[in-house]
Amino acid sequence: MRHEHRWNVRVRRTGAALVALSAMLIAPIAPTAPSAASERPVPPERSSVALGGVDPRARQDLTSSPKVAAGLKVAALSSPIGVGQREVVGVTWSADTLSGEVGDLLVRTRDDGRWSAWEELHVDESHAPDGSTLEGRRARRGSAPLVVSGADDVQVRVATASGRAPRGLRVELIDPGRAAADANAAAPTATATATETETATAVRPTIRTRAEWGADESIRKGAPAYGTVDVGFVHHTAGSNSYAAEDVPGIIRGIYAYHVTSLGWNDIGYSFLVDKWGRLWEGRAGGVDRPVIGAHTRGYNAHSFALATLGDHQTAPVPEAVDTAYTTLFAWKLGLSHVDPTKTTTLTDADGSPTKVFRNISGHRDFADATKATECPGQALYERIEPLRPRVRSAQGAMFYRPLIDRPGWRRGDPGGVTVRASASAALTWSLEVRSAGESRIVATRTGSATSGSGLVARWDGLIDGLPARDGSFDLTLTATSGEDPTRSVPPWRTTVVVTDPVGDLLDRTRRHPPRGPR
């Protein structure tokens, strides 16, 4: 089956009675959300319906469902499942099932007694935590979430190569609740502009917080984990583009609840989300300015972040506001880690293979290999990536990229010093400050200038007040300002070098490897 993730929105709500469940209903994990907007985040409600085989009450529906693809057999078909106030539906199963066993997953909905056509409920194995992490090892497998607001019932069909249902197969139903955040989001305004109070060359855009979309932090698991930012990935959630402004917080809460309570992830998978008005929303918790490890591009989460557009851009054009949001967020976020958006980075999958070369702004589909593929972020959005890269670099302004030191330290008594080299996007005035590790007092400062042609070369000769530095750790901080506008600063870059005591080194080596006596 084609791998994709999908977020479909049906915006009309009806009040029809519930139809009996086709299998045992597992108790909700949280109290029902109040119908009125609340000042506090509303806990989501999740219910599960176990699936296995063809429900006898649905046997006649086999003839009306699409023909099963060659090599597959129907493993499960539910009878109509009542939706009630729940707005999100998905299908999950145990992670120990062999990859690819679910070959076909279809769903349809009923409104006012009329069934929709059957449609594919997409499974995207690549939109997940890294398999080597605890989060990845304990996660369930499953489909992307489907929003069914306004539907009375849903029905699900699963086909596998063996004709046997995967272990733990179940339909998940989620009500993301109602929160004050919904009403507050009803009147969108242009928000992809920068926060001009900052002095960085690429300033931080306005990003709505988790509290502003009503995140229930009590369901989030564990502490945030941190990696590096080498690549920014472009995603879309897929599905309908017809949502209203006030729907957005609830949609994000639904994605969050499904990722956490149904798939077993620690948190929502995306780093950031953007709606069709260009409003940016905080995704995974841990600090928007920090390299939080998400669950968006399996195998490469520890070295990247992702911005997902709410909606489907396979054929639908990308709104200008969304283009602007990608430009401002990527300029700021990549700039914090001194990443040149026009260059490439080589990354190795967390599983050890494969090693791939990524554009520093890449689409989700760029990670594909023989076993993993996706249409994300949709063809129309994917085609915007190449023109996005130089636009992001221009928005960054004066910047130095990929600073590296020529050595991590030296032994006291040896020729000392360390050199930092980086490329520069424009003329810069730089300063290299040296501090004893953990202390605020500056013990040495070096300054200079750089150009885009010559790059930046900053050297500390290892001297403090004219004398060689004593043994210990030293924190180096490299800062710079634009050569044209000294009020615009480049985000600081920090590293540590170590000066070792040669006598201590000798004693330590002697203790670890004592000399042998004559034989």
Image (cartoon, rainbow, N blue to C red):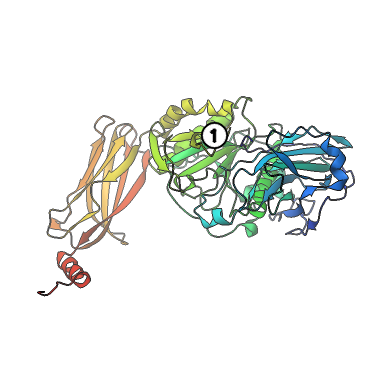
Residue 323 in the image: state x and y as whole percent: 54, 29
Residue 275 in the image: state x and y as whole percent: 62, 36
User: Is residue 378 depicted above or below 124 in this figure?
Assistant: above
The N terminus lies in which quarter of the figure?
top right
Q: As rendered, which of 196 and 145 lies closer to the eye?
A: 145
> Circle 1 sits in a helix, a strand or a loop, which is it?
helix
Specify whether 434 is left or right of 415: right
Q: Which residue is mark 1?
A: 325
Instruction: Locate residue 185: give its quadrant.
Output: top right
The C terminus lies in which quarter of the figure?
bottom left
Q: As rendered, which of 69 and 175 lies closer to the eye?
A: 69
At a point 58% along the width and 57% down the height, the residue shown is 138
Residue 56 in the image: state x and y as whole percent: 86, 47
Q: What is the residue that sits farthest to the left in this orientation?
A: 518
User: Is residue 162 depicted above or below 134 in this figure?
Assistant: above
Instruction: Locate residue 277: give its quadrant.
Output: top right
Specify whether 87 is left or right of 427: right
Looking at the rendered structure, the kind of residue marked 1 is Ala
Q: Label 1: few (<14), some or many (≥20) within 10 Å? A: many
Q: Is residue 245 visible?
A: yes
Q: As rendered, which of 77 and 433 lies closer to the eye?
A: 77
At a point 83% along the width and 33% down the height, the residue shown is 64
